[in-house]
């Protein structure tokens, strides 16, 4: 009877460890899959691969231009530059006042 209980407990522990490992590693594995950070170099490599072996990467020239424009202007898709600058100015004022 005791061995059956121990076996059941060990199975439960193993299932818990596997579930925790899955919860931890799945977001890490899909980190760059959804929105790649495209540059002109990555777009050129993707186009060259597409021309030679008919399989390209995820970066197109349009995606690279869009990502470059976001980096240059400071927009990351979560707000406008004006809002970010206003927040930055508020933080600066708070530091000066203290």
Image (cartoon, rainbow, N blue to C red):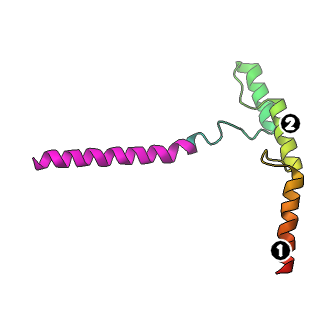
Residue shown at 89% from the left, 48% from the top: 73
Q: Are marks 2 and 1 in contact (CB under 8 Å)?
A: no
57 or 80, which lies in front?
80
Judged left or right of residue 2, residue 80 is right
**Residue 70: x %, y % from top left:** 84, 44
Disc 1 on helix, strand or loop?
helix
Report helix, strand or loop for mark 2. helix
Q: Earlier in the sequence, mark 2 or mark 1?
A: 2
Q: Which residue is mark 2?
A: 65
Q: Nearer the viewer, mark 2 or mark 1?
A: 1
Image position, residue 44 (x, y; %): 81, 31
Residue wearing tag 1: 94
Q: Residue at the spot x=69%, y=22% of the render?
A: 55
As drawn, 18 above or below 52: below
Using residue 18 as the reference point, say whether residue 55 is left or right of it: right
Quarter containing the C terminus: bottom right
As for residue 65 lying within the magenta part, the answer is no
Left or right: residue 19 versus residue 4 is right
Along the line of sight, the residue nearer the viewer: 81 or 52: 81
Q: Real-space Cα distance between discs 2 and 1?
A: 37 Å
Residue at 74% from the left image edge and 20% from the top image edge: 52
Q: Locate residue 46: give its quadrant.
A: top right
Vertical arrangement, residue 86 with respect to residue 73, above or below: below
Dominant secondary-structure state across the stretch colored magenta: helix
Q: Residue at x 81, y 40 (%)?
A: 67
Q: Which residue is farthest left?
A: 1
**Over which residues does the magenta segment extend?**
1-28
């Amino acid at each position: 009877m005791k061995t059956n209980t121990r076996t059941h407990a060990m199975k439960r522990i193993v299932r818990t460890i596997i579930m925790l490992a899955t919860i931890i590693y799945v977001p890490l594995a899909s980190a760059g899959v959804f929105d790649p950070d495209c540059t002109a170099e990555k777009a050129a490599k993707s186009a060259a691969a597409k021309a030679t072996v008919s399989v390209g990467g995820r970066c197109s020239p349009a995606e690279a231009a869009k990502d470059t424009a976001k980096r240059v202007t400071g927009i990351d898709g979560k707000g406008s530059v004006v809002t970010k600058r206003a927040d930055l100015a508020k933080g600066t004022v708070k530091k000066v006042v203290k």
